[in-house]
Image (cartoon, rainbow, N blue to C red):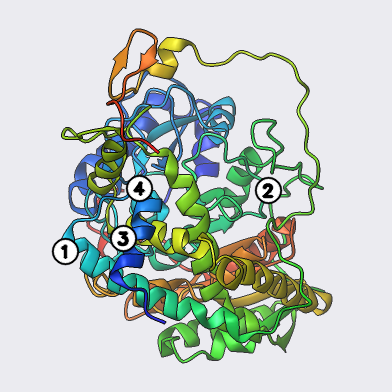
Amino acid sequence: MAIDREQILHVAHLARLELRDDELERLGMQLNDIIDAVSKVSELDLSDVPPTSHPLDVVNVWAADEPRPCLTVEEALANAPEREGDYFRVPPGGAT
Amino acid sequence: MIDTLRLTAEEATRLVREREISSAELYAAYREAIDARDPELHCYLHVCGDDGGEGVPLAVKDVIGTKGIPTTAGSKILEGYVPVYDATVVERCKANGLRVLGKTNTDEFAMGSSTENSAYGPTRNPWNTSRVPGGSGGGSAAAVAAGLAPWALGSDTGGSIKQPAALCGNVGLRPTYGTVSRYGVVAFASSLDQVGPVARTVRDCALLYSILAGCDPCDSTTVDLPQPVALPERTDLTGVRVGVPVEFTDHEAIEPGVRAAVQAAIELARGLGAEVGECSLPRSLDYGLPCYYLIAPAEASSNLARYDGVRYGYRTANATDRLDMYKRTRDEGFGDEPKRRVLVGTYALSAGYYDAYYGQAQKVRTVLIREHAEAFERFDVLLTPTSPTVAFELGAKTADPIAMYLNDLLTIPSCMAGLPGLNLPAGLSEGLPVGVQLIGPQFSENTLFRVGYALEQAIGFDVVPLPLRGGRPR
């Protein structure tokens, strides 16, 4: 099953990637090859097998609801590409 | 004169503790080795100055966050990022008298098997500088092999500790999932990622693991070890049942030289008193790789969503609006491999395809766990090659992502099952190291150390790379 250009653009949008034309061509082709290779998992009939999301048998790990020291505002903003006062500054509009 | 090529971390620890050498002298010896050899090898992305602290130096893979020390994960998108806190593993190392020597090169976001996906250029293999060191942790493995660190931290999602250890001739442990905290570590695929030790001997590896392991309230997937780490001492394998999965030793991708070295290790194990028998893991070999290349990219597509140019890291200079800023930042900041995996993962998780790809892969994962559990009813440990090949030429596989993925054919299945795996150098083929992989049930690290240590003594592998032997100050 081939993934066409329109689908690749849709997936790239979902992944918030602005692919250049040459990338669209190259990565699109590789995406097809990889999906084709990993489709091998569908050969197995696993209707009776439960899925594994986590390899250890650990359940319900709770933390006590107690305040602990955390980053200061200055620390949290230390690596910000752009800040305004105590906020991260971003360009307006267009977001989803 | 301190010979950084041969000094074990255990011995270095003793020398510092008994004040036979100072911390400053030890640090200076590694700095000197780095200054001499790293311009060619490029193991380090950042080397720290001596801050006057005490302790034994440690190299840290650059996906592990270090307070005040740049942490890039081998990506342009994190260029200039300086963490404001230490990863728990770094905290634990510091609390146990270790000092960060520098940050080692890695494939971008630990995605790769050759370290060629690093945005900062590849690392070269100290055994032959036209060859790759493996990956993603090629920087840590090559640094330890070349005497540029006594030991190092790595991270392993599908083979990133074990495979470079095999290609560089050192001992690397991927621990049981959940035994080592990932807090402060750049996340790739969270149901698989593990931090672990890279060392020159099995005892050094066990020592570093004993420092790393343990429950961390900041990583809710962690648990305490059921028993403390035991430094191995016995040189026999009496009563140990060693299983050899036939598919893992007979596969057509395995080079004859690798097969021969692994066969020799099997014979040695038998000679040391182990009960050796064959077993079979057919589905693990056939379906492990495709299963991994659905689950790991799916989780990566979610984990890498945080690199949006808002809070840290790179931001594009020419965005028209916020959505455009996200998209251009990610296009300009990520290299090809993270983009490929984010696309594969997003596709596999998207509406209409989720059950067929991600859901099915999660079921395959259960099959792999069951298949391994069945083998461990009869055996204490499984022995296989770690990598199908010895170190390959730089550039040999960069144009073909699927050929590159095959490097991890033999390391991936046990990672999917959450099992620990140890790489042990077993000999040379074409003048390059061959590694054997020892796999055990969950929490069986002490068994892996015991078997690894006994085999290590019997094999007598010289961990100093051939080009660095002799002619160097001792």
Q: Position of residue B276 (x, y in %)?
A: 73, 84
The image shows residue B170, relative to residue B18, as above or below, that is below
- Amino acid type, residue under disc 2 in the picture: Gly
Report the front residue among B192 and B374: B192
Residue B33 visible? The answer is no
Image point 83% across, 76% down: which residue?
B377
Q: Kindly identify which residue carries mark 1.
A: A22
Could you tell me which residue is drawn at 40 percent across and 74 percent down? A34
Q: CA distance from mark 1 to mark 3?
A: 13 Å
Which of label 4 and label 2 is nearer to you?
4
Disc 2: host chain = B
Amino acid at the residue labelled 3: Leu
Disc 4 versus disc 3: distance between alpha carbons? 10 Å
Residue A10 pos. (x, y %) = 36, 59
Name the amino acid type tagged 4.
Arg
User: Within 10 angstroms of label 4, few (less than 14), some, or many (20 or more) residues?
Assistant: many
Q: Secondary structure at mark 1?
A: helix
Disc nearest the viewer among 4 and 3: 3
